[in-house]
Amino acid sequence: MSLELSIVMPCLNEAETIASCIKKAQTFMQENNIDGEVVIGDNGSTDGSQEIAKNLGAVVVNVEKKGYGNASRGAIEGSKGKYIITADTDDSHDILNLNLFLDNLRSGSDLVMGNRFKGENKKDAMPFLHRYVGNPVLTFIGNLFFRTNLGDFHCGLRGFTREAYEKMKLSTPGMEFASEIIVKASLLNLKITEVPTTVFPAGRNRKAHLRTFSDGWRHLRFLLLYSPKWLFLIPGFLCMLIGIIGAINISFDTNNHNLKWIPLFAGLFLISYQFVVFYALTKIYATNHGLIPRKRSYDNLFVYFTLERGVILGFFLTLIGVAIYYFGFKNNMESTERILKIIVPAIVVVVLGIQTILFSFFFSILGLKEEK
């Protein structure tokens, strides 16, 4: 039977608080006449959490693979609601007041994010590092990389439609699941809305599963891997710009005071090319494997750049570099300064030519799936 709402909660040894969370979810649906269910994604609890949940009428989905993301996805896939709202089972979320989430989903939003900083933040509800360092920094990076405008990237209270969930094809196993939802929604141009919500101190006595530094790094790593433009392309262009400016400065330096910088600028230029190549290859691989959405520019890439064109370009660059190298030695043997100014750029051009040929073959291999 199809339901309107599924309130989904991952669980690992939350016997102290799971009953309170389930009762609040059921109370919210009863008071607002919502046809819904509570689904618990149990990740191998050994403290009786499953029995508590079943006795209260919740649907319990046993998820063997460990991790917050795995438990969340297991519960979502075992739910039946048209709309899905996720919450934690530590009793820190305001599950009794989900009207803003559901109203926005009914009005056409694909993803509704809770913002703990716009709502009431109870004392000791968030650790100092999470509230003032980790979450603001990761939220800023996420907004910058993916052009979102959110104030809280990692609130565990969020809602989305089942249709949006199926489009996002979520796959991360751990805490980075929270970032993946926003990133995939942004890349797919889904409608994202943010609403205020209250956060409370966790109701349990044991330590939280969240690990400040390791899970923070998992979030940051995920944001970088899903944004090859910021990971490879922009650093590549910066290195290239520095290399070009340095090369021009050395070329017009008649006193040859800056010759010692030639190897550095040459190296930066080669590094920049590697960055750009890695950006292109990562983009192709990620698109082919469904990690990022396919765009029209991706299709045009295989039309304008082919193996043959790449090999020809690389071959001519190599020939040009060899010619510069030869004539540099032949005509300027008496001047060490002139040799450095000509030979080093010649070697750079040769290396770029060979790298272009190799890149073209690798590019073609990745494109075989496209041809198929």
Image (cartoon, rainbow, N blue to C red):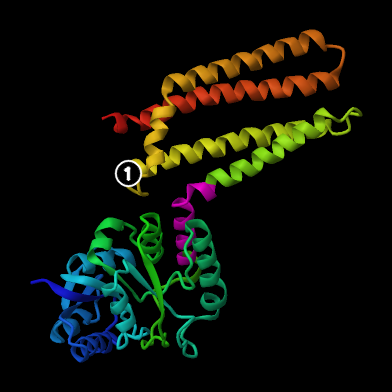
Q: Is residue 3 magenta?
A: no
Q: Residue at x 31, y 66 (%)?
A: 110
Q: Residue at x 50, y 63 (%)?
A: 143
Q: Nearer the viewer, residue 285 or 245?
A: 245
Above/below status of 358 relative to 92: above
Mark 1 element type? loop
Residue 311 shows in this picture: yes
Residue 87 shows in this picture: no
Q: Which residues are magenta?
A: 215-231
Q: Position of residue 256 (x, y in %)?
A: 88, 29
**Snapshot quadrant of residue 298:** top left
- The residue that label 1 is drawn on is 289
Q: Residue at x 21, y 75 (%)?
A: 6
Task: Please name the amino acid that badge 1 sits on.
Answer: His
Above/below status of 89 relative to 270: below
Q: Nearer the viewer, residue 273 or 31?
A: 31
Q: Nearer the viewer, residue 329 or 7?
A: 7
Q: Residue at x 48, y 25 (%)?
A: 358
Q: Residue furthest top?
A: 330
